[in-house]
């Protein structure tokens, strides 16, 4: 079943997205109870024992959830019911995406992730159960036949061009993203533009796979935002930016990407002044970047949930000790969400982190973070005593070249 937006509704949809950056999720119904009935849950998340099921067993449970959820989606209007059932279908496909990713994730990375989960749960026994379960999953792995079967459940008998569902279903939009990623890994794997750039994808994949102009416009925009944030090479950056401007038709979305472009150009300009910030430290004192002028400033953008960020902390501590009393400030800027401020405060104090420990006001949406086009962490920034950017993507503390650079500057 395919539904079409009237031209005026399509215009309102795209303009609203350009202004707000968000789309509604009003087709969704609460299926959590149905999921919990067939899949063991802890704190709202599927227990890792669920992922020990083989694909056919996992899908049998999905089918039971779907049967119940379809009944919950019933409304007096058959068209609305059909749309809500499509939302259910794609939410459950996304559950299968997670199931597949669990088998594909590197064992060491997953165990590190589960240790973070264990820390947050304050339940060491539960944390160890998670780690044990993941070790079993990794040992089991998926056969080629199981992988093909699982992919068929996720991607077959599906349409990435349903305008009305895209406009009103977060689950469907997430599935479209997974679909495009799958196409890039399989159908278009010969394109090596982003082979070593995590998350990057050629816009040609969207052009070839998405026929809906409205979905194509938004996906061009979202993928270009990611592409331009992860690409470091100025030549490739310009190529991607120019390609987007040729393909994109929505003026509002073009304007937002223009801001990203301008940020990159400014950071590439020699002696550009760093944008200022004022953020609170763990005692509530306001720290302003411009007030730190007179010394070099090395900023570590991190979060308590970020495993690679935490892996850099021992090296950062060593660096702070080696350069203690020298002409440099060390600033650790957390992009944890405000509701996780307690977790951040506890981590900083319990691990006796030094330097300036501050927290951004709106995590990744904070003005300072956005002006540096930061899409992933850890990220390091080096600023000179006059407040000008030395390096917008500086070396990590664990990289010996950082120490060499600082010794020369100081």
Image: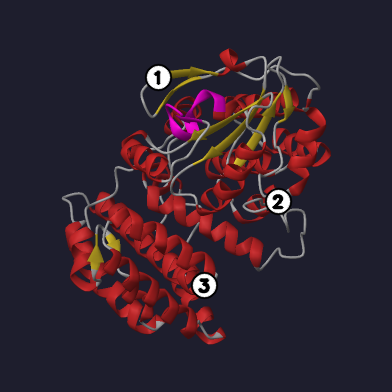
Q: Nearer the viewer, residue 334 or 353?
A: 353
Q: In this rendering, which labeled residue sits more in front, label 3 or label 1? A: 1
- Structural distance between the alpha carbons of marks 3 and 2: 33 Å
- The residue that label 1 is drawn on is 285
**In terms of image quadrants, where is residue 238?**
top right
Residue that carries the numbered disc 2 in the rendered image: 204
Against 116, residue 376 (above or below) is: above
Comparing labels 1 and 2, the label whose residue is closer to the camera: 1
Q: Is residue 253 above or below residue 75?
A: above
Looking at marks 1 and 2 on the same chain, the residue that comes earlier in the sequence is marked by: 2
Given residues 246 and 329, the one toward you in this image is 329
Asked if residue 364 is among those painted magenta in the image, a careful observer would answer: yes
Q: Residue at x 53, y 44 (%)?
A: 215
- Residue 357 sits inside the magenta stretch: yes
Q: Compared to 77, does 342 lie above or below?
A: above
Please state the horizontal and vertical placement of residue 326, each as a whole percent of the image. Answer: 68, 27
Find numbered disc 3 in the image and state the secondary structure of the residue it sits on: helix
Say how many tags the image has: 3
> How far from the left and from the top, in percent, is residue 16?
44, 28
Camera-side residue: 135 or 47?
Answer: 135
């Amino acid at each position: 079943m395919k539904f079409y937006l009237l031209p005026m509704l399509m215009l309102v949809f795209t303009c609203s997205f350009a202004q707000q950056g968000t789309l509604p999720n009003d087709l969704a119904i609460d299926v959590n109870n149905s999921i919990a009935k067939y899949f063991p849950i802890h704190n709202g998340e599927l227990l890792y024992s669920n992922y020990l099921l083989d694909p056919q067993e996992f899908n049998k449970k999905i089918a039971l959830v779907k049967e119940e959820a379809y009944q919950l989606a019933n409304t007096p209007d058959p068209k609305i019911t059909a749309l809500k059932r499509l939302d259910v279908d794609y939410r459950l496909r996304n559950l299968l995406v997670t199931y597949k990713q669990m088998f594909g994730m590197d064992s060491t990375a997953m165990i590190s992730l589960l240790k973070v989960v264990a820390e947050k749960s304050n339940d060491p026994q539960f944390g160890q159960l998670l780690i044990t379960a993941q070790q079993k999953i990794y040992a089991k792995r998926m056969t080629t036949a199981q992988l093909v079967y699982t992919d068929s459940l996720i991607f077959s008998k599906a349409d990435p061009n349903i305008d009305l569902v895209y406009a009103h279903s977060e689950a469907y939009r997430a599935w479209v993203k997974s679909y495009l990623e799958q196409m890039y890994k399989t159908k278009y794997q010969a394109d090596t533009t982003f082979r070593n750039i995590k998350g990057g994808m050629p816009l040609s994949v969207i052009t070839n796979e998405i026929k809906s102009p409205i979905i194509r416009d938004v996906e061009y925009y979202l993928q270009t935002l990611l592409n331009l944030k992860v690409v470091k090479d100025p030549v490739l950056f310009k190529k991607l930016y120019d390609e987007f401007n040729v393909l994109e038709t929505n003026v509002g979305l073009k304007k937002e990407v223009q801001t990203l472009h301008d940020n990159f150009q400014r950071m590439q300009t020699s002696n550009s002044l760093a944008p200022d910030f004022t953020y609170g430290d763990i005692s509530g004192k306001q720290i302003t970047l411009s007030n730190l002028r007179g010394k070099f400033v090395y900023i570590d953008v991190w979060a308590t949930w970020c495993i690679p960020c935490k892996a850099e902390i021992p090296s950062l501590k060593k660096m702070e000790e080696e350069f203690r009393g020298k002409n440099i400030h060390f600033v650790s800027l957390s992009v944890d969400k405000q509701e996780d401020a307690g977790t951040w405060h506890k981590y900083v104090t319990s691990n006796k982190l030094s330097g300036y420990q501050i927290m951004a006001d709106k995590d990744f949406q904070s003005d300072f973070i956005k002006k540096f086009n930061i899409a992933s962490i850890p990220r390091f920034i080096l600023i000179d005593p006059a407040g000008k950017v030395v390096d917008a993507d500086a070396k990590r503390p664990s990289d010996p070249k950082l120490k060499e650079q600082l010794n020369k500057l100081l």
